[in-house]
Image (cartoon, rainbow, N blue to C red):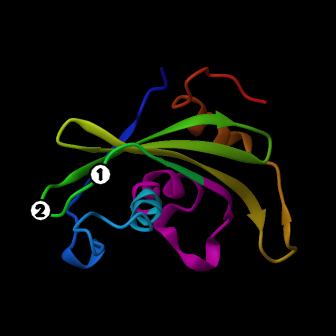
Amino acid sequence: MMMMIYETEIQPRFSETDALGHINNAVVPVWFEQARSPIFEIFVPGLAPEDWNLILARVEVDYLAELFYQSSVTIKTGIERVGEKSLTVKQEVWQKETLAAQGKAVLVYFDHKNKRSEVIPDSIKQRLQKFTADRASS
């Protein structure tokens, strides 16, 4: 089992509900992005947009149970894999001790000026590696 390293508590907003009174499916990827902020800070201390060096290449979400307004959720975040130019982040949404959604995001280390992916620096890989499940880099 993968170690989840960050937990983010979110209070769902009324505006995030759908016509059935559930949290809209489109909200979960937004929550996941918010919960990835500690990982973003490893790459971009201070999160300055002009220094941003990541792009989102893939996101997937599996919805496992309904989510409801008026009950906080916990987003658990961990790093599944660190590759040469990208990393895979695994995330879960928990509400009232129920795993309601899980997903993955692939983030690519990217040079926006030259419009190309780059090798993740060893100094960043070392900081990320301690949070991976298998401690292996590929």
Q: Secondary structure at mark 2?
A: loop
Tell which tag, 1 or 2, sits nearer the viewer: 1
Does 47 appear in magenta? yes
Q: Position of residue 49 (x, y in %)?
A: 57, 77
Quadrant of the image containing the C terminus: top right
Residue 88 appears in which quarter of the rendering?
top right
The circle on residue 83 is none
Q: Secondary structure at mark 1?
A: loop
Does 55 appear in magenta? yes
Q: Position of residue 26 (x, y in %)?
A: 45, 68
Residue drawn at 47 percent across, 61 percent down: 29
Which of 132/50 is in front? Answer: 132
Mark 2 lies on residue: 70
Q: Position of residue 120 (x, y in %)?
A: 75, 48
The circle on residue 66 is 1
Compared to 124, does 45 lie above or below?
below
Which of 42/134 is in front? Answer: 134
Q: Number of labelled discs?
A: 2
Residue drawn at 51 percent across, 61 percent down: 45
Residue 18 appears in which quarter of the rendering?
bottom left
Q: Amino acid at mark 2?
A: Gln
Stretch in magenta: 34-59
Measure how far apart labels 1 and 2 are at the Cα level.
Answer: 13 Å
Residue drawn at 41 percent across, 60 percent down: 28
> How many C-alpha atoms fall within 10 Å of the one at disc 1: few (<14), some, or many (≥20)?
some
Residue 69 appears in which quarter of the rendering?
bottom left
Q: Is residue 79 left or right of residue 13?
A: right
Residue drawn at 14 percent across, 56 percent down: 71
> How many C-alpha atoms fall within 10 Å of the one at disc 2: few (<14), some, or many (≥20)?
few
Q: Is residue 2 left or right of residue 88?
A: left
